[in-house]
Amino acid sequence: MKRHILRAKIHRATVTGANLNYEGSISIDERLLEAGKFVVFEKVDIYNVNNGNRFSTYVIPGKPGEISLNGAAARLCMPGDIIIIASYAEVEEEELHHFRPYLVYVDDKNNILEVKRDMEHVFTF
């Protein structure tokens, strides 16, 4: 059986832009994409800490420090909002013991503070 497990997240990123007239997506600083092993066009869930909005979109590379919501998603976040960007993977149950997500922590300017592979939570059955 496969389980949907957190694969990577960028924790408490600050939204720097909202472009309603762009065709869609979220533009993310390429350094953050690399740190979390995100790929272009990967589906991500966005959790807005400020207003509680939760939605899905896809990733495109952005400029240094950039976290910009594009298209319809621009109506769900405003510059200055704090968001969590999460990606999930399907993992076979026998792989859960070895699977660790990429946890990317950033400051209020979206600079990387720390990247962790969560070792505290071990799956037990």
Image (spheres, rainbow, N blue to C red):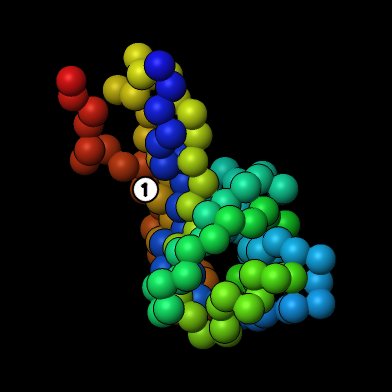
Residue at (57, 75) in percent of width and height: 76
The total number of labels drawn is 1
Residue 115, how many percent across, how many down?
41, 52
Residue 13, how many percent across, how many down?
48, 70
Residue at (72, 48) in percent of width and height: 41
Secondary structure under tag 1 reads strand
In the figure, 48 relative to 102: above or below? below
Residue 118 can be seen in this image = yes
Residue 51, how many percent across, how many down?
43, 78
Residue at (51, 46) in percent of width and height: 87
Label 1 neighbour load within 10 Å: few <14, some 14-19, many 20+: some
**Quadrant of image for the C terminus:** top left
In the figure, 98 relative to 82: above or below? above
Residue at (18, 24) in percent of width and height: 124
Location of residue 93 by image quarter: top left
**Quadrant of image for the N terminus:** top left
Question: In screen coordinates, is 22 left or right of 57?
Answer: right
Residue 107 can be seen in this image = no
Residue to which mark 1 is pinned: 116
Q: State the residue in front, 38 or 4.
A: 4
Q: Amino acid at mark 1?
A: Lys
